[in-house]
Amino acid sequence: MEKEKIAAIVKRIDHTILAPVTTWAEIKALLDEAIAYQVASVALPMSYIKDAADYAQGRVVVQCPIGYPAGYTTTAVKVFEIEDAKRNGATEFDMVINLGWVKDKRWQDLENEIRACKAAAGDLILKVIVEAGLLTEEEKVKMCEIITTAGADFIKTATGYNTTWEGYNKGVATVEDVELFKRHLGPGVRIKAAGGMYTLEDAYKFVALGAERLGSKALLGIAREEGFQPET
């Protein structure tokens, strides 16, 4: 794959390290890599956000997961997490929806929660994680409508964490889901495809479909293996 196509992928990567045993040394190495390659952002454990923001000094966007990974904390807790992460230097937020509310068809509660989280984020970017692999097509369409109405900035396919439920597609982004989102989202709501990208061709497929962000732990390493290097 030519350098320009690889660059189009790299600049969309939300470079991620969210394992429970993540250490500061690992985060610092990820930050150095992210800064060098100028990825879109880094996604880090909340307890390290301040350390990361202080270290990065604005050289890369520091993103914080909210309600992660299950999404069933209360709205007040999610709002507080956003406010706390903002104070600590995060400038993007990836929020997991309450999937039980989806199954109960509590659409207004879902809209209210997303709206409250966007109000807490203010002018900063809020991405809404819907765990598409756990939703029916009808539920996906409804979440597109709610996310649009509530004013969020992105819809995101999955956390990549909730991979053990019966019938779940292991948290990977799919062409079908991204195409469905594209059809049903309102103007201005962007798409983040997360998971399931094991080659640069996989990633470019989602870019071509209109995904503005790509959530991945591995993509930058794959790009590097293909010979892609940061500008010097």
Image (cartoon, helix red, strand yellow):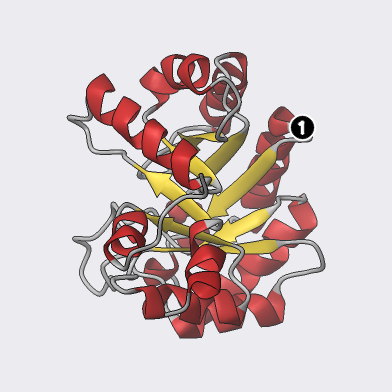
Q: Residues within 10 Å of mark 1 (few under 14, many from 20)?
A: few
- Who's the residue at 57% across and 20% down the image? 57
Q: Whole-percent x and y of residue 221?
A: 29, 56
Q: How many marks?
A: 1
Find residue 39 and report its horizontal and vertical position in percent: 51, 48
Badge 1 marks a residue whose secondary structure is: loop
Residue at the image point whose x is 53% and y is 64% from the top: 7
**Residue corresponding to mark 1:** 122
Q: Position of residue 163 (x, y in %)?
A: 23, 60
Q: Nearer the viewer, residue 63 or 218?
A: 218
Q: Amino acid at mark 1?
A: Gly
Quarter of the image where one finds residue 22: top left
Quarter-wise, where is residue 167 in the image?
Answer: bottom left
Residue 199 percent across, percent down from the top left: 31, 74
Return the residue nearer the eye: 136 or 59.
Answer: 59
Q: Quadrant of residue 69?
A: top left
> Residue, x 47% and y 78% (percent of image)?
2
58 horizontally vs 18: left or right:
right
The single residue placed furthest to the front in the displayed view is 232
Residue 139 visible in the displayed image = no
- Residue 78 visible (yes or no): yes
